[in-house]
Image: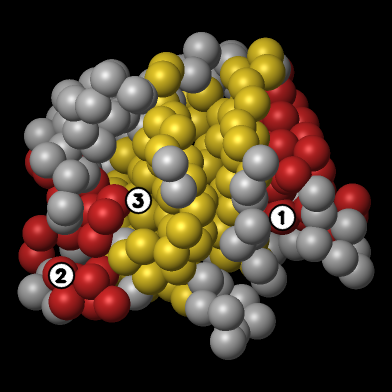
Amino acid sequence: MCRHAAWLGAPRPLTSLIHEPEHGLMRQSYAPRRQRHGTVNADGFGMGWYDPAAPEPVRYRRAIPVWADANLPGLARVARGGCLLAAVRCATVGMPVEESATAPFAAGRWLLSHNGRVARDAVRDLAGADAAESTCDSAGLAAAVFHRLRTAAPSSTPSAAGLGAALAEVVTSAAARDPEARLNLLACDGTQLAATAWGDTLFHRPCPDGVLVASEPLCDDPGWRPVPDRSLLVVTPDGSRVQPL
């Protein structure tokens, strides 16, 4: 399994997901509190953010434990934006440990992270002719989602409904082929977030200036709300909604 977190709202630095919270992703990399599979997320980490001057999101990924990167604290303090995504990885047995297998995966304006596992045969043909970044199961899921987004909105940024629908379609299709799959996906395009809870925990926390989404709470504030299993969460500047899958 893995742990991931995201933010949509007023600009803030990536350290607000990783280092600043008592139970941010730095701590979740070695001491997660609600992780159901695996105990340490030391097989890589990644983060993505949106610079208003750039047409595509910026990514920083490493295939080492997040605590082993001496440059990360300084970078995470200055990397900031109104839409952020970060993840720490516990690789599924048999999956490669390499930067290309580390979330967030990207295509155009989209970023995606996967917390879980799925048989690669269950997603192999869901991406059409689109190539995945890696041979790992998570990259295959990402390619399948990106394929649906391109097909639905080839010339424009999809609506929040489109982003959520793409995640929902891929998750339900993959689960039908692999009933043991765990399919917590988290995706964004710079203006919206969508996430699924399917086999592991997911939480969101409305704040005065935005919304946090995470595999598990980043702090002990009572404002964190669990997302029911087999549900879809969609977050826009107007708020968030949860619906069953």
Front-most of residues 19 and 40: 19
Q: CA distance from mark 1 to mark 3?
A: 19 Å
Task: Residue at 31% x, 62% y: name it.
Answer: 14
Tell me if 145 is positioned left or right of 128 in this view.
left
Eyeballing the image, is 41 above or below 204?
A: below
Q: Can you identify the residue that label 2 sits on?
A: 73
Q: Can you identify the residue that label 1 sits on?
A: 146
In this view, which residue lies farthest toward the front? 208
Q: Secondary structure at mark 3?
A: strand
Q: CA distance from mark 1 to mark 2?
A: 30 Å
Residue 45 in picture, x, y percent from top left: 29, 58
Q: CA distance from mark 2 to mark 3?
A: 15 Å
Eyeballing the image, is 17 above or below 155?
A: above
Q: Residues within 10 Å of mark 3 (few under 14, many from 20)?
A: many
Tell me if 237 is positioned left or right of 229 in this view.
right
The three-letter code of the residue at mark 3 reads Ala
Please identify the quarter of the rendering in which residue 177 is found. Answer: top right
Q: Earlier in the sequence, mark 1 or mark 3?
A: 3
Q: Can you identify the residue that label 3 sits on?
A: 87
Residue 84 in picture, x, y percent from top left: 44, 58
